């Protein structure tokens, strides 16, 4: 099979050389030099480990062999197992047990895959593609938050050109183990791109050419438990598919818990939505808590990692979301926080010489704004929703400048109040300052009328009194429909 793959690759290269020679017939010396360079690269061993894998990686999809009767194994399933489970699996496959105790997890996975291949089995894998400047790419594992590792899958430049692959594409298919002198697994045959047939990726419309619209389909936040937090969000600052929302939060006001409840409401009510939680510069224990309490995909870069790592994770997540939207899928990103992401960009961008108040470089906020601005509802299918937290009252002038730059860029704003949180009232939402633009597209006419009346009634009240009253009334009703039906607009105490 590999001889046939090398023949395919040679045909692709010869065709490229022929095309170049036709375009530059007046420059025969250049063409000759290019041919010699290509042959020289094939004869000599490449210096980089990635190039080592590319020397035998297929340029295109080979003709699929019959897989009937052959056992299949997914490398992604192995990475989710613990070390003890991997050792048990290795013993079941007949791998000698003498050295199993000293092997690291990645080495143990390699031995299992090697034994599986020698037994005639097939290996499958999937991951998010990151294309490097050299033209080739690697599939990064979501389980490792897209951190480069030895278990990454090599994708050749010819495969990238053939399938019109971009950074962020979720590629799945059959892979082969590294040969002698190689370090990485290589993609043998691409079977799916973003969950669709590879042909779909070749005809998709680029994200920047899609037409954005106002959100017009509400994401239902009410859950079976009747939690007052998500019910308040559903009424006073509804979230639609394609929303660009900010949760403005002082320290210790419950923003992380609100994000968890929003995430669980989405997974419960909208299984069709692809949910991603992106945690930037967070504490490790909060990352673990999120992964255990939320069913969505949690991608994290903790505070003990470099700013360049924060930026790399964020860019991989937004590119992946864009690729799924191009395939007309609904995606929700919950970002904690946009402030820390902007700080990371401020440390990594080349200095422009123009420093704003608080030490913010004038070029530092461009990419965070592009990240946040990518949220949109797409005409004829697909949406990208981004709900990000913005930190205020931290004592940092930089945080205030970042918040002022993002203020007004969203079409939904939820403001948390430290005064309410100090009274141990949760959710600590300031109802008067929170709301959604064009909420008439998300709420029914009857709901809209009653909410407007309710806002007029509670406007003279104190912020703490409003939350106390809403929590009390919502605990007495099962859902928002019953709450609005029982609403009496004669006075604030009768609501």
Image (cartoon, rainbow, N blue to C red):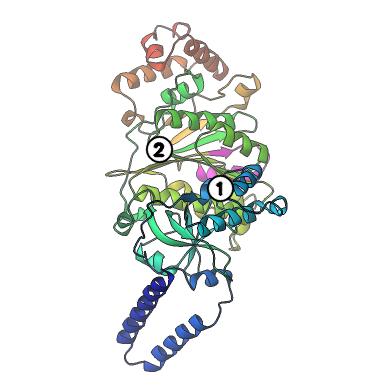
Residue at (31% x, 59% y) in the render:
202
Q: Is residue 72 shown above or below 22?
A: above
Residue at (59% x, 63% y) in the render:
350
* Residue 273 image label: 2
Residue at (47% x, 59% y) in the render:
175
x and y, in percent, of residue 284 in the image: 66, 41
x and y, in percent, of residue 386 in the image: 46, 41
Whether pointer 1 and pointer 2 mark residues with C-beta atoms closer than 8 Å, the reply is no
In front of the other: 426 or 115: 115
Task: Give the image quarter of residue 454.
Answer: top left
Residue at (39% x, 58% y) in the render:
190
Q: Is residue 384 shown above or below 111?
A: above
The local secondary structure at tag 1 comes to helix
Question: Quick check: is 164 in the magenta stretch?
Answer: no
Please state the extent of the stretch shown in magenta in the rendering. 389-406
What count of labels does the image hold?
Answer: 2
Q: Residues within 10 Å of mark 2 (few under 14, many from 20)?
A: some
């Amino acid at each position: 099979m590999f001889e046939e793959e090398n023949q395919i690759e040679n045909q692709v290269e010869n065709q490229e050389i022929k095309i170049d020679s036709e375009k530059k017939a007046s420059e025969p010396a250049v063409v000759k030099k290019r041919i010699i360079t290509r042959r020289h690269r094939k004869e000599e061993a490449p210096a980089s480990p990635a190039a080592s894998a590319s020397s035998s990686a297929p340029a295109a999809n080979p003709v699929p062999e019959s897989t009937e009767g052959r056992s299949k194994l997914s490398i992604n399933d192995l990475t989710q197992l613990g070390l003890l489970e991997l050792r048990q699996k290795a013993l079941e496959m007949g791998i000698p047990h003498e050295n199993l105790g000293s092997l690291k997890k990645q080495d143990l996975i390699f031995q299992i895959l090697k034994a599986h291949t020698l037994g005639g089995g097939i290996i499958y894998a999937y991951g998010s593609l990151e294309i490097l400047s050299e033209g080739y790419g690697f599939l990064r594992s979501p389980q490792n938050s897209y951190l480069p590792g030895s278990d990454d899958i090599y994708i050749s430049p010819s495969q990238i050109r053939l399938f019109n692959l971009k950074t962020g594409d979720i590629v799945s298919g059959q892979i082969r183990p590294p040969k002698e002198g190689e370090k990485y697994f290589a993609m043998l045959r691409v079977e799916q791109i973003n969950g669709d047939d590879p042909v779909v990726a070749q005809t998709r419309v680029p994200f920047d050419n899609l037409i954005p619209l106002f959100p017009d389909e509400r994401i239902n936040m009410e859950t079976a438990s009747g939690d007052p937090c998500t019910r308040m969000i559903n009424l006073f600052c509804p979230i639609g598919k394609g929303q660009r929302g900010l949760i403005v939060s002082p320290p210790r006001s419950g923003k992380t818990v609100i994000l968890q409840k929003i995430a669980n409401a989405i997974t419960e009510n909208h299984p069709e939505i692809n949910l991603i939680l992106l945690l930037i510069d967070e504490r490790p224990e909060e990352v673990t808590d999120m992964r255990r309490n939320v069913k969505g995909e949690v991608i994290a870069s903790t505070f003990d990692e470099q700013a360049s790592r924060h930026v790399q994770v964020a860019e991989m997540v937004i590119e992946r979301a864009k690729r799924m939207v191009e395939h007309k899928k609904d995606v929700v990103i919950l970002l904690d926080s946009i402030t820390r992401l902007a700080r990371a960009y401020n440390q990594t961008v080349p200095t422009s010489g123009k420093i704003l108040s608080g030490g913010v470089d004038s070029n530092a906020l461009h990419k965070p704004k592009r990240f946040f601005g990518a949220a949109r509802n797409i005409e004829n299918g697909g949406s990208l929703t981004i709900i990000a937290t913005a930190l205020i009252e931290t004592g940092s002038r930089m945080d205030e400048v970042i918040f002022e730059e993002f203020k007004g860029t969203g079409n939904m704003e939820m403001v948390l109040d430290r005064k309410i949180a100090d009274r141990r009232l949760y959710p600590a939402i300031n109802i008067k300052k929170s709301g959604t633009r064009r909420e008439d597209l998300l709420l029914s006419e009857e709901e809209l009328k009653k909410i407007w009346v309710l806002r007029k009634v509670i406007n003279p009240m104190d912020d703490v009194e409003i939350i106390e009253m809403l929590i009390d009334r919502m605990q007495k009703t099962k859902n928002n429909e019953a709450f609005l039906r029982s609403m009496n607009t004669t006075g604030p105490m009768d609501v």
